[in-house]
Amino acid sequence: TQLLKQSPQFLSIQEGENLTVYCNSSSVFSSLQWYRQEPGEGPVLLVTVVTGGEVKKLKRLTFQFGDARKDSSLHITAAQPGDTGLYLCAGARQAGTALIFGKGTTLSVSS
Amino acid sequence: GAVVSQHPSRVICKSGTSVKIECRSLDFQATTMFWYRQFPKQSLMLMATSNEGSKATYEQGVEKDKFLINHASLTLSTLTVTSAHPEDSSFYICSARGYDRDSNQPQHFGDGTRLSIL
């Protein structure tokens, strides 16, 4: 059973387009994190959300945590080729416990 | 920001060899470290949770005798793949989390180790 369902799995878009990646679960999470990973490297933390309904912005990236803390989304505005990579959502069921990862979204932005 | 160093970054060795991978937290004390395995174009799969000074907790299906974990200090955890075989070839990634009152503190990841068993 996949606890965190991430979609879409693959996304190929043109530079300048907007996109949204979703991370959904039937379980409540204490916190949820988004990471970006490039080939051959470890994941790099983008953001942590802990409060239901929380919205955080990181330049062209907007992260939202659902009111019930069961889902999250990542929205990228005006995507650029440099945004290409694997985006991973990961949640902790309880504070201090190991992260559960979604399957990831491979984003390809072409110029 | 917090830095986690993982070494080596790449290992190529013969079948039957044991391989040790180190994970160090460079600017914070990591009470808990995690070891993950990642197959190409897939997400991270948690193998085990390592707490300093105690035995690691392994996820279901992960052989503890195959993947030996030692967390001897607050800045170092090691993963030893014993008698490695080609099916053990994978990308192994560690992460570390420090301790403070904010128990939602995020994990910081090393850059991974690409293990190739011939």
Image (cartoon, rainbow, N blue to C red):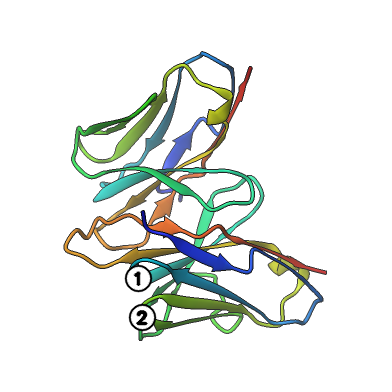
Q: Position of residue A62 (x, y in %)?
A: 34, 27
Q: Residues within 10 Å of mark 1 (few under 14, many from 20)?
A: many
Q: Residues within 10 Å of mark 2 (few under 14, many from 20)?
A: some
Q: Position of residue B81 (x, y in %)?
A: 63, 77
In the image, taking residue A93 as reference, residue B70 lies left or right, namely right
Q: In the rendered view, tell whether residue A81 sits above or below residue B96.
A: above
The local secondary structure at tag 2 comes to loop
Q: Nearer the viewer, residue B14 or A7?
A: B14
Name the chain letter of the residue that bears numbered label 1.
Answer: B
Quadrant (top left, top right, bottom left, bottom right) of the C terminus of chain B: bottom right
Tags 1 and 2 both on a single chain: yes
Q: Which is closer to the viewer, label 1 or label 2?
A: 1
Rendered residue at 80%/77% (across/down): B15
Which residue is disc 2 drawn over?
A: B52
Could you tell me the amino acid type at mark 2? Glu
Rendered residue at 33%/35% (across/down): A72
Q: Nearer the viewer, residue B115 or A27?
A: B115
First reached walking from the N terminus: tag 1 or tag 2: 1
The local secondary structure at tag 1 comes to strand
Count of numbered circles in the view = 2
Q: Looking at the rendering, which quadrant does residue A110 occupy?
A: top right
Which residue is disc 1 drawn over?
A: B30
Q: Position of residue A2 (x, y in %)?
A: 45, 48
Could you tell me the amino acid type at mark 1? Ala
